[in-house]
Image (cartoon, helix red, strand yellow):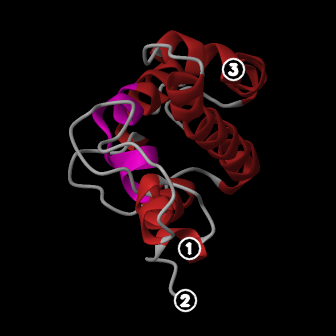
Amino acid sequence: MSQRNGLHNRVWTADRLAKTNLPHPEKCPLCDQEDETINHLIVGCVFARQVWSLVFQHLGLSQLAPQPSVTRFSGWWKRSSAAVPKEVRKGLNSLIILVTWEIWKHPNTCVFDMKRPSVHEVLAGAAKLQEVLYRSLPHGA
């Protein structure tokens, strides 16, 4: 299995649920614009890109936020990590993991708890680590 196949095809997004004939949303629960795949959900979705933009803007690293042309999470992460000094890379990688987790969980909240997508809720979930990283990362690193 290639990484292109939904991070080793282990993430239960709508595309994988459909292949196993399980109930799934017709479109991404966060943007209602495209099919839900892991790459769409984490970096392709306009909702996710808004979250990433706000996180990186807060850290003075706006240039690292995924742009509409980004289609693969793994490639974007690798490029973002390589773009910062080595001494802050571990912290940035931790932040990316945490924000990815918060974005990944959010569609479940929308589907199962009948809530509307909320950038604020996603950011609140990542706030503690972001606060720590904000103090440790030099602005514009």
- The answer to which quarter of the image holds residue 59 is top right
- Mark 2 vs mark 3, foreground winner is 2
- On screen, residue 3 versus residue 125, left or right, reads left
- In percent of width and height, residue 37 lies at 40, 57
Q: Going from the N terminus, do you reach mark 2 or mark 1 first?
A: 2
Classed neighbour count for the residue bearing mark 1: other residues with Cα under 10 Å, few (<14), some (14–19), many (≥20): some
- On screen, residue 128 versus residue 134, left or right, reads right
Q: 57 or 46, which is in the foreground?
A: 46
**Circle 2 sits on which residue?**
1
**Circle 1 sits on which residue?**
9
Give the SS element for disc 2: loop
Give the quarter of the figure containing the N terminus. Answer: bottom right
Give the SS element for disc 1: helix
18 in the magenta segment: no
- Identify the disc placed on residue 125: 3
Q: 14 or 71, which is in the foreground?
A: 14
- On screen, residue 98 versus residue 119, left or right, reads right
- On screen, residue 131 versus residue 26, left or right, reads right
Q: Is residue 4 above or below residue 18?
A: below
Q: Going from the N terminus, do you reach mark 2 or mark 3 first?
A: 2
- Mark 3 vs mark 1, foreground winner is 1
Q: Going from the N terminus, do you reach mark 3 or mark 1 first?
A: 1
Give the SS element for disc 3: helix
Classed neighbour count for the residue bearing mark 2: other residues with Cα under 10 Å, few (<14), some (14–19), many (≥20): few
- Residue occupying image coordinates x 68% and y 24%: 126
Give the dominant element type of the magenta stretch: helix, strand or loop: helix
Question: Mark 2 near mark 1, Cβ–Cβ under 8 Å?
Answer: yes
- Residue occupying image coordinates x 73% and y 44%: 94
State which region is magenta: 39-50
